Amino acid sequence: MIRFPATLQADVGKHMPIVRETRFEDTCEISGIRHGTSAVGEILTFREKDIIIATIQRSAKVTLRWQPHANAYVGSLGGVEFQTPGPKSQAFRTRR
């Protein structure tokens, strides 16, 4: 085990960079555009402002792509269009 002088040990935490991280939930609310019904979808794949692949009630798999003009993810399955604003996010700061 390496021992550092007491003054060095006190300074170690001060010089570590603070990093901002964002974590996203693994579910999101997916709503049908025409009928307005909504369901909670479990996210299988997520890339922010790109794509969401989710399952609805663990029986239907839907792919939603980011649409900047709508500011939402939009996709269709079986002739029904779905949209979601995406999963909720939490931003926090941490030291590395």
Image (cartoon, helix red, strand yellow):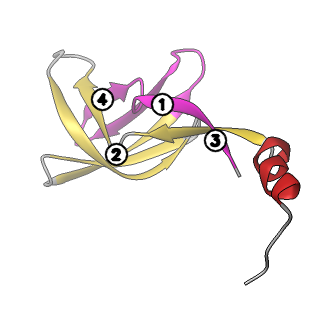
| Res 95 → quadrant | top right
Distance from Cα at disc 2 to Cα at disc 4 = 21 Å
- Give, as a three-letter code, the residue at label 3: Thr
Q: Is residue 83 above or below residue 45?
A: above
Depth check: 36 or 39 in front? 39
In the rendering, which numbered label is found on residue 81? 4
Residue that mark 3 sits on: 94
Tell me which numbered mark, 4 or 1, is placed earlier along the sequence.
4
Residue 79: x %, y % from top left: 25, 36
Quadrant (top left/top right/bottom left/bottom right) for the N terminus: bottom right
Query: Which is nearer the eye, 82 or 47?
Result: 47
Q: Position of residue 73 (x, y in %)?
A: 45, 30
User: Is the C-beta separation of discs 2 and 1 under 8 Å?
Assistant: no
| Mark 2 vs 4, N-terminal side | 2
Most foreground residue, 96 or 44: 96
Callout in the foreground (4, 3): 3
Q: Amino acid at mark 2?
A: Asp
Residue at point 81%, 53% (across, down):
12
Q: Position of residue 55 (x, y in %)?
A: 24, 50
